[in-house]
Image (cartoon, rainbow, N blue to C red):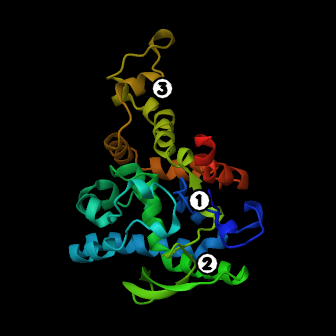
Amino acid sequence: MLLFSEYFGINKDQNDLNFVNINLESDNKLFVDPRLIDINPLFKNYSNSISLFWCSLLETRKSKSFKKSEYLLKGLKEPKETMLGYGNGRNGKSIAEILRNKLIYSINSNENFINGLTKSLSDLEFFIKDISSDRLSDMTTKIVYEDLILFTQEQCVRYNITMFYSLQEYFDFNNFKWINKRVLLPHYQGKPIVLIPKQIVNSESKSNRNLSIFYRYAIKMFVLFDEDINKEIEGTGKDGKILAKDIKERFPLTKDLIMKWNIKYPTLLIDFQSNYFSSYINCLSDSEIVEIVCRKKHDAA
């Protein structure tokens, strides 16, 4: 294992660094979480960029501009330069190549998008199959990639790290288009590195629990009180009372189910995010980041 700080001669531990001190010899199972960006005022510019990109994507439905949808999505490639996520197990194809048709179809036909029931990019993981924490992380990273390049350059200047020119693609919000530009970045074995602020990453386990948390909340706060649905269920509680486990058995968790419930209960997602889910959105501690970055070494021992 070779940490970024070790290779570049930075005599500091993770708790003294503003960025994720990645292992340069392996992918690091951490994911950029757009929700952590939204709640942190330090990353207001990142949050604004994500919102603007998302709103522009939704606008393509109203204007029926499918070519613009494809154009916006085409640049959302897996950002290997960050060395986060599942990079080694993936082929690096863009989101557009893998999920383009599914995303465009959902935006144009799913009532959750048509009726404005989804408010942010992060909601995609609740309603579109094949989009979970890893894909959401990739999309978020590429949308704010220019900001991440600037962040990386600032850290390199701070620690006197030599940078080299590298051709990078990012979304230029001034001209609202994808551009390729030579930018200065640190290199390891001839390949560029883009650093990620430690406050905006989450673990695999925390990122992947969001859908199940939403599912349990929907049952507890909405479905249990839905007389129409309860007619279909035989309760196993005292005096035939319907319990949460009865609903789970009758309606196993799927994204199709979540989509239907969110349409049936128009305030479900809003209530969930404002009254409940916010308590689950916390950035990782330095020790948690270190444990994840170093996990491969420990597992192999």
N-terminal label among 1 and 2: 2
Mark 3 burial class by Cα count in 10 Å: few <14, some 14-19, many 20+ = some
N-terminal label among 1 and 3: 1
Q: Which residue is mark 2?
A: 151
Residue depicted at 49% across the width and 53% down the height: 270
Nearer to us: label 2 or label 3: 2
Q: Which residue is mark 1?
A: 201
Q: Amino acid at mark 2?
A: Phe
Q: Determine contact: label 1, label 2, CB under 8 Å.
A: no
Q: Helix, strand, or loop for circle 1?
A: strand
Inter-mark Cα distance, 1 to 2: 15 Å
Q: Which residue is mark 3?
A: 244
Q: Position of residue 14 (x, y in %)?
A: 72, 61
Q: Nearer the viewer, residue 273 or 191?
A: 191
> Please, is residue 244 above or below residue 21 in the view?
above
Q: Amino acid at mark 1?
A: Val
The quarter of the picture where the C terminus appears is top right
Q: Is residue 257 visible?
A: yes
Residue depicted at 31% across the width and 72% down the height: 74
Q: Nearer the viewer, residue 134 or 11?
A: 11
N-terminal label among 2 and 3: 2
Q: Position of residue 142 (x, y in %)?
A: 44, 71
Q: Helix, strand, or loop for circle 3?
A: helix
Hey, which quadrant is residue 175 in on the image?
bottom left
| Left/right of residue 254 with respect to residue 140 in the rendered view | left
Inter-mark Cα distance, 1 to 3: 32 Å
Q: Amino acid at mark 3?
A: Ala
Residue depicted at 78% across the width and 69% down the height: 11
Q: Determine contact: label 2, label 3, CB under 8 Å.
A: no
